Image (cartoon, rainbow, N blue to C red):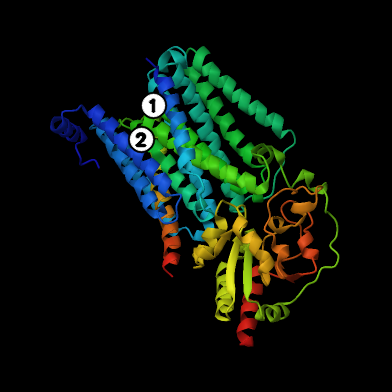
Amino acid sequence: MSGVNSELLASVAESATGVESSNLVAAAYLVSAVLFIVGMKRLTKVRTARAGNAYAAVAMFVAIAATLIDIGTVDYSWMIAGVVIGGAIGGIAAVRVPMTKMPEMVAIFNGFGGGSSALVALSVLWSSVIEPGASGSGADILGGAAATTLVLSVMIGALTMTGSVVAYLKLAEVISGNAILLAGRHVLNAVLLLGALGVGGYITVVAGTPMEIQNGVLAVTIASLLLGVFLVIPIGGADMPVVISLLNSYSGVAASATGFVLGNNLLIISGALVGAAGLILTQIMCVAMNRSLANVIFGGFGAEESGGGGGGGEYVNVTSAGAEEAAMMLEDAESVIFVPGYGLAVAQAQHAVRELASVLEGRGATVRYAIHPVAGRMPGHMNVLLAEADVPYEQLIEMDIINPEFKDTDVAIVIGANDVVNPAAEHDKTSPIYGMPILTVHEARMVFVIKRSLGAGFAGIKNELFEANNTNMVFGDAKKVITALTQELKAAD
Amino acid sequence: MMGPLLVGIYVFVLAMFVGFEIITKVPPTLHTPLMSGANAISGITIVGALHAAKTGDVTLSNMLGCAAIVFATVNVIGGFLVTDRMLEMFGKKKKK
């Protein structure tokens, strides 16, 4: 990269086209923005998704090349150091990470995006205000709009970063995946948010010396970092799909805010696209849980409220079966639907399930998989997991399409899913999950629920499905149970 | 004549609408790739980060800029590659 004399390049381009290099850069940014939009659109269709991702990568390349032309010939030491280190980390992570670790990977990457935006904003503040020792408020030196968006960029970027780190730690089970509720957290969060905004306002209009601005921005940064931690800590594992989508959106909004600081439309556009994509996913996840975004973020669902609500208490009339018995009942099944949940990911049972499916298909059964939108820990978690085990994606059926099929299905096998198959959500108005769309597994002629014990699901409530007459509980580790089932079925041939 | 802030807000709002219009009806299979692809796109801050580290001096602003480049590059390289890996996996299934 350093070998390219970009100033020369720019002047060549200028003499060739007769336009100034700044116009060339602006035109290249437009090309880049259009490619991002087309790429994003293609990412939403299965057939074109891979090309869409490539379009976006090309857009990024164009943007970076144009930026280097814009910057001209400079000392590239810092740039090269940054690109080499970041490229190595990103490249190695992308190639090495197992598909089963995708939720963690996506979570931490959101954090990198947010962190980068905050760091750019801080760097601008240092290079144009603090290091030159300029006097006056942020607005005096940078202009009101740039100073204000700079503060917002630092805030959103910093809280996205620490929020993502906490999400990552929860997913990696370094810290408890359950909701961790701190007393007075709403007050604490309000104080941090208003404090950061207040000090941000102080930097923008009141502060008069570089020292005052520096201290102020440090306070804003620290408050925002803490806010990110405190916002995500109280959110439990099953709500992670919402949180990850939302942090994804924030990382885009942070990039947009940085675009405002730099007066760069490409950053504003691409950031807004990411922000929109994240918000749409967030909304899909919220609808799939029948909960508002506010309820997910502030609710602390499944922790303090879990004692209340209907449907608690001991299980009665539970029928359980061993693998051998279950295999016998599976022998004659002509249609089987697997219903995977987070437990499948925990037990790493996806390959075992795929093998069982092959055996069933070998016996002439049709096999499908019912995917609830919030099954797992991130949007699309089950799809990635099953794809990794070579399950054809045509067999993964969305909730709305598969639900009418259950009543004509011989056997539904629930693996590590709980609340998303609880019929109480349909009829029990006292249930905390009432109104949540569920997979109507109970309508199948026979249901197997593979589960370690009768423990409550994330919502902490009893699952009526487990007591249903057509349900057989198969207790044990999902992978072991499925493997045993497969062997029994093979032996029966 | 609009001020630069207002122009920026125009661009932001319109781009948001473009985003909402083009990303409707995402099949669940693509939820994760869309998210990680979007993630890579948010690495566009690398454009700002490069500007933030363009002198060779050992100053805090350059160090912050360099750190920003590291973060953004992780996003860009890691994000696009891992998204491609996932989509390749999905594509492979289709041929069967």
Q: Quadrant of residue A224?
A: top right
Question: Within 10 Å of the Cα at label 1, are there few (<14), some (14-19), or many (20+) other Cα atoms?
Answer: many
- Foreground of the two, A169 or A453: A453
Q: Residue at x 72, y 38 (%)?
A: A182
Name the side, left or right, on which A165 lies relative to A188: left
**Amino acid type, label 1:** Leu
Chain letter for mark 2, please: B
**Both labels 1 and 2 in a single chain:** no
Q: Residue at x 61, y 38 (%)?
A: A229
- Foreground of the two, B67 or A13: A13
- Determine whether A449 is above or below B43 in the image: below
**Residue A194, x across and y down, in percent:** 62, 24
Q: Residue at x 47, y 24 (%)?
A: A149
**Amino acid type, label 2:** Val
Disc marking residue A262: 1
Q: Quadrant of residue A473?
A: bottom right
Name the side, left or right, on which A23 lies relative to B76: left
- Foreground of the two, A210 or A265: A265
- Helix, strand or loop at mark 2: helix
- Helix, strand or loop at mark 1: helix
**Residue A429, x across and y down, in percent:** 80, 47
Mark 1 and mark 2: Cα distance apart in space = 10 Å
Q: Is residue A306 visible?
A: yes
Name the side, left or right, on which A74 lies relative to A341: left
Quadrant including the N terminus of chain A: top left
Disc marking residue B47: 2
Q: Is residue A161 visible?
A: no
- Determine whether A147 is above or below A385 in the image: above
Q: Quadrant of residue A38?
A: top left
Question: Within 10 Å of the Cα at label 2, are there few (<14), some (14-19), or many (20+) other Cα atoms?
Answer: many
